[in-house]
Image (tube, rainbow, N blue to C red):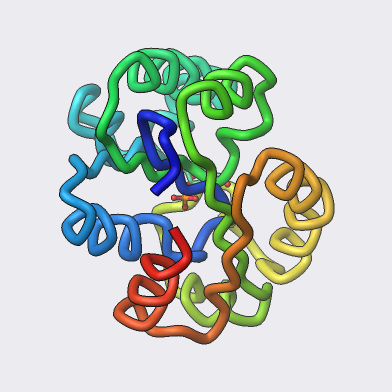
Amino acid sequence: MNPAPNLVLVGPMGAGKTSIGRQLAKRLGLAFVDCDQLLEERTGAAVPVIFECEGEAGFRQRESALIAELMQGRDQLVATGGGAVLDEANRRALAARGFVVHLQVSVAQQLERLARDRSRPLLAGPDKQARLEGLAAVRGPIYAALADLEFDADGLTVATATERLHARL
Ligand code: S3P
């Protein structure tokens, strides 16, 4: 296992960062932290409500503060939100204190998983496919540049993805 103090999952919405991360953390004996869930616990508000009240900018500020805080710790598996890598300070903190795994997934698979999802404000409204493709075009290269390890989770169950990713660490 890489000597970085934390393991970090990055990648797009619906890649399985939360579900695979939780299982993998168990296997590795790491504390599991999901950034969005922790933000929701601390604010008492769901992510769409934070977006509604504070805008995306307000959400990003909270997300950045949380990442800075978490990256001071160790022995955690941190599942980031899909947009966390947009901020340069976040990228620096994640790279400095984490072994970063990019979970890759196809837009088709994202659509399947997120078709009825109401918890992602960036996917509200029509034409989720175009939105996801636009996000992938911008963010794909950022995930790739940051990653210590690329892992293709497309079409895999949580159990299989966890097993295979574990084997590659
Ligand atoms: C976002 C992804 C979400 C959440 C927020 C914004 C994004 O997290 O942080 O809705 O910008 O891609 P998941 O990647 O866990 O869905």
Q: Which quadrant of the view contains residue 40?
A: top left
Return the residue nearer the eye: 133 or 5: 5
Return the residue nearer the eye: 129 or 91: 91
In screen coordinates, is 159 left or right of 122?
A: left
Question: Can you give x and y, in whole percent of width and height, for residue 141 in the image?
Answer: 80, 48
Q: Which quadrant of the view contains residue 169?
A: bottom left
The correct choice, above or below, for 112 with respect to 119 in the image is: below
Question: Can you give x and y, in whole percent of width and height, for residue 127 in the image?
Answer: 71, 69
Return the residue nearer the eye: 94 or 60: 94
x 83%, y 55%: residue: 137
The correct choice, above or below, for 86 with respect to 32 in the image is: above
x 61%, y 59%: residue: 125
x 49%, y 65%: residue: 14
Return the residue nearer the eye: 132 or 7: 7
The correct choice, above or below, for 138 with respect to 127 in the image is: above
In screen coordinates, is 98 left or right of 39?
A: right
Question: Can you give x and y, in whole percent of width and height, for residue 117 in the image?
Answer: 42, 66
Question: Can you give x and y, in whole percent of width and height, for residue 98 in the image?
Answer: 47, 32
